[in-house]
Amino acid sequence: MDTVLGPSSSQQDSFEEVEDAVSAVVQGVDCALVCYGQTGSGKTHTMLGPDSYSEALSASLSAETFGGTQDLDHADAGIIPRSIQRVFDAAEEIKTCEQTEVTLWLSMLEIYNEQVRDLSPLDLSNESTGGSSSQVPRQVFARLVGEERAALSSHTSHGSLVLEGLQEVRVHDPIDVIRAVLRGLESRASSKTDMNDRSSRSHLVVRIRSRMQRGDLGDFREGVLTLVDLAGSERLARSGALGEARLEAQHINKSLSALGNVLSALQRKSTHIPFRDSALTSLLSPCLTPGGGGRAILFAHISPVAADAQESTCTLEFAVRAARV
């Protein structure tokens, strides 16, 4: 392992391990931060923070008392809010030092039973407002839920997943992004199992695309930060999943196995990397393709509970495979 973060480690400790990679996105580097582990092991805590933080953040946005950097760098803030703030800070640093234009774009989706669904709560492009998207009326951020939630058609092109109809909206400040993420999370598929009272039943993907352009010469660089909160792996005998929940668990485990197969192929330096075997691995392919210049960082989460020792061992074995790529 590159780093081991124990129970006493802070959220800031976690972010410091990936801060340089996050900053590099505005320089045109593709980067993926992926949280992996069994259900209930703390992946969403790492990516977002504890429920109390998310609830307080939502309340401050609703009451229009959002504290900006103070809230996104709060001691409880996870990887996603800290990364949002860091990307905007890095963009401002480049604008000041290199006299370049940097634009940022947001999209958000979930992979549920191998269907890719748009979770973006931004229902129209803020380009038409002529100003900051934070000036768009609040009702714009209302999210369609249930049967109205968009299901996207997808196909592969040159080994990467092309999402037809996925909303990608230009964002001008951190409040745009964190508001959208919190609203989008309200539509993420989740349910109760014997192992987790609120188990995520889909892989969550937040993407921030950066485009840096120097002058009017057409010289530009693009980088994408892909933040992934994976649904937890689970053993059906322990989770007690039945019916639809059982089908969800099977799809979750299948896609995680596909990711493991990709890592094994990369480790062997195989001539064929099975990126197309799942939507998840297709989305991650720009950051995993050999020689592509992208970066991928895996947070492997293990449970401190003795009864989870077998699952924890599997997680560590998965992490070892990733570390050897």
Image: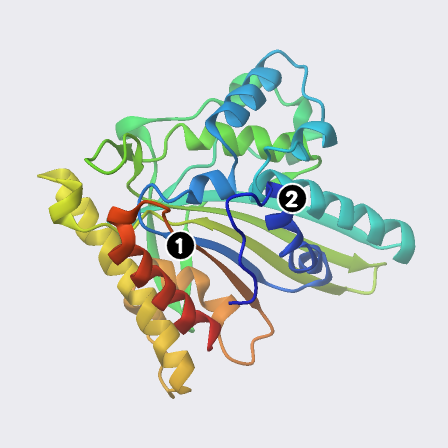
Q: Mark 1 points at which residue?
A: 36
Q: Name the residue under label 2.
A: 12
- In primary-sequence order, the first of circles 1 and 2 is 2
Does the image show residue 122? no
69 lies left or right of 269: right
Q: Position of residue 279 (x, y in %)?
A: 33, 58
Residue at 34 percent of width and 37 percent of height: 150
307 lies left or right of 42: left
Residue type (three-letter) at the residue carrying disc 1: Tyr
Determine the image quadrant of residue 274. bottom left
Against 261, is 208 above or below? Answer: above
Does the image show residue 170? yes
Q: Where is residue 146 in the image (x, y as percent from the top left)?
A: 28, 27
Against 183, is 267 above or below? Answer: below
Q: Position of residue 27 (x, y in %)?
A: 73, 62
Residue type (three-letter) at the residue carrying disc 2: Gln
Determine the image quadrant of residue 188. top left
* Residue extending farthest left: 243
User: Helix, strand or loop at disc 1?
Assistant: strand
Determine the image quadrant of residue 224. bottom right
Crowd rating for badge 1 (residues with CA inside 10 Å; few <14, some 14–19, many 20+): many
Residue at 37 percent of width and 87 percent of height: 270
Q: Where is residue 40 in the image (x, y as percent from the top left)?
A: 33, 41
Residue at 65 percent of width and 64 percent of height: 29
